[in-house]
Image (spheres, grey):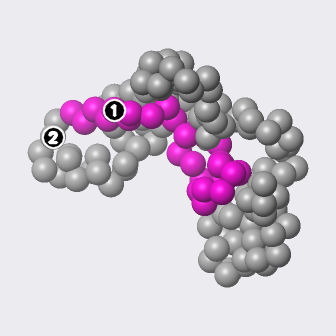
Amino acid sequence: SREIIQMARDAGAAKVYLASAAPPVRYPNVYGIDMPAAEELIAHGRSVEEICSAIGADYLIYQDLDDLIHCSAEGNPSVDGFDCSVFDGAYITGDVDERYLKDLSDARNDAAKARGDARERAHGAVVGIYNDR
């Protein structure tokens, strides 16, 4: 996003507003989607205003999570819920704790990838816990 905003400014934009069709992604997915570690997510631990400043936008708006849930249910009334863990940190299995998230971060963060440290993933010690269900 930072690069896109800079490209808009380089092209002469006086103001750059950014809108996201999703809520801010603040937490990692633990159910099989390979995502950055939590601390590598721009929204992790930051307010919308802090994210806006970090990416250099003049204004930033995200989809509201409650509105997203409502719209999804409206589109298919048989859906009574879905996993919002990347947005709210509430993991549907109920057994994801801080220790697990730290181990996952240690295995997935950019430093581990740069070292070629895929040992944890190869042995399934961290990531495999939810991929086998």
Q: Position of residue 41 (x, y in %)?
A: 57, 48
What number is the disc on residue 9? none
Circle 1 residue: 19
Instruction: Identify residue for label 2.
Output: 13
Q: Position of residue 81 (x, y in %)?
A: 62, 26
**Which callout, 1 or 2, points at the residue further toward the start of the chain?**
2
Q: Residue at x 64, y 74 (%)?
A: 113
Q: Is residue 33 or residue 54 the one in the foreground?
A: 33
Most common SS among magenta residues: loop
Residue displayed at 67% across by 81% down: 116
Q: Which residues are magenta?
A: 15-43
The residue at the far left in this view is 12
Question: Does the image show residue 41?
Answer: yes
The three-letter code of the residue at mark 2 reads Ala
- Looking at the image, residue 48 lies above or below residue 101: above
**108 in magenta:** no
- Residue 33 among magenta residues: yes
Q: Position of residue 37 (x, y in %)?
A: 65, 55
100 sits to left or right of 70? right
Q: Judge by depth and name the residue closer to the eye, 124 or 44.
A: 124
In the image as oriented, which residue stretches furthest toward the bottom?
116
Task: Give the residue drawn at x 82%, y 43%.
Answer: 96
Whether residue 104 is visible:
no
Is 47 situated above or below 106?
Answer: above
Residue kind at label 1, given as amino acid type: Ala
